[in-house]
Image: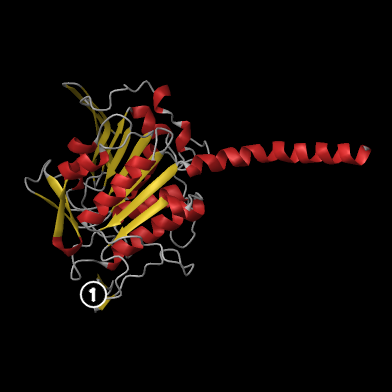
Amino acid sequence: MMRSLMTVFTIAALLLQLTPVRAQGSDQEHLYAVLINGGRNKLTNHERYWNDCSFLYRTLSQTYRVPKRNITVLMSDGGDPEEDMLKADARGFASSSTDLDGDGWQDVDYPATEQALAFVFLNLSKKLTTDDHLFVFIVDHGGSKDRENNSYIWLWNDQQLSDRHLALLLNQFDIGSFNILMGQCYSGGFMDDLVREGRIMTTACSGSEQSWTSPDKPYDEFVYHWTCAINGADETGQPIDADTDGDGEVSMAEAFEYARSHDRVNETPQYASEPEALGAKWTFRRPADIRTEHMGIRADRSAPVDTWSLSGVRMNSAKRGVYIQRQGDKTRKVIR
């Protein structure tokens, strides 16, 4: 009898010890990601785009233990074995691997086409709830019709996806929060269509600029540093510390600041969070800690948004930033 009681108490104690682990895991269960590399076509689908997606995929699945079933990857021609990628040395072509983390399993789910993208977002919008959070990453070629706010991304087979079309795809969701990272040229031109309540958005450049590759690595410069920041290490495992407030986590505001300050090429990274506190607290470890109802966010997600924060304009040579903070018609610039 005594042994039975001791066994019961021992099991109960173990369950109590395991409770925090289950709670942390449940947060990751509610975090989803969509990684997109359109590439445009075989001649323009640079190997660095695959590298960007692979580094970020490994960061999500290995560093943050996001379940792989929660990560959807749309990559150029999908699983087609034909050559679809220009090698980093520009001396030939290769078929981009569908294994992003080297474990021998296929990680690419769909080709990066307009039809596949609409299918993925529609299905996710039906599945995800206000308890869930979605991270969207796009690295690709981009274009602009006015070099300001009318931008688009190139999908596979020379398809174009406009900023307004992407906004329609994302607006069908009713979830806890969005976190959007864009690395393509003219990506800042998506800001006016995508930034709204409950969203964080980061772009490699403004709506009038091109984005650039790293001068010494086969990655895109801004998104590489951004991924290093949240990973806590570069692609070789060399430690990176972007946790400026010392709380043990890298928020989206901290990741932006690290990538912005380490960006060495001629581009102007942009950042917006609505509300501002969302990006300052949102991390990949604890996205569920940011409950939108606790942030004072309006229930009506269709209402127009008139508050932006930290939309950074950096002067490369001086390593300084101009942060645009806007409340309605009032605009204030803060130089750092």
The residue nearer to you, when weighing 62 against 222, is 62
Q: Residue at x 41, y 64 (%)?
A: 100
* x and y, in percent, of residue 13 in the image: 76, 37
Quarter of the rendering containing residue 207: top left
The residue nearer to you, when weighing 33 against 255, is 33
Give the mark count. 1
Q: Residue furthest left?
A: 146
Q: Is residue 162 above or below residue 41?
A: above
Q: Is any atom of residue 233 visible in this view?
A: no
* x and y, in percent, of residue 209 in the image: 15, 49
Quarter of the rendering containing residue 273: top left
Q: Quadrant of the C terminus?
A: top left
Q: Residue furthest bottom?
A: 91
Q: Is any atom of residue 158 visible in this view?
A: yes
- Left or right, 25 with reference to 41: right
The residue nearer to you, when weighing 151 against 256, is 151
Q: Residue at x 23, y 27 (%)?
A: 302
Q: Residue at x 32, y 41 (%)?
A: 125
Indicate the amino acid at tag 1. Answer: Ala
**Which residue lies under the disc numbered 1?**
90
Q: Quadrant of the N terminus?
A: top right
Q: Residues within 10 Å of mark 1 (few under 14, many from 20)?
A: few
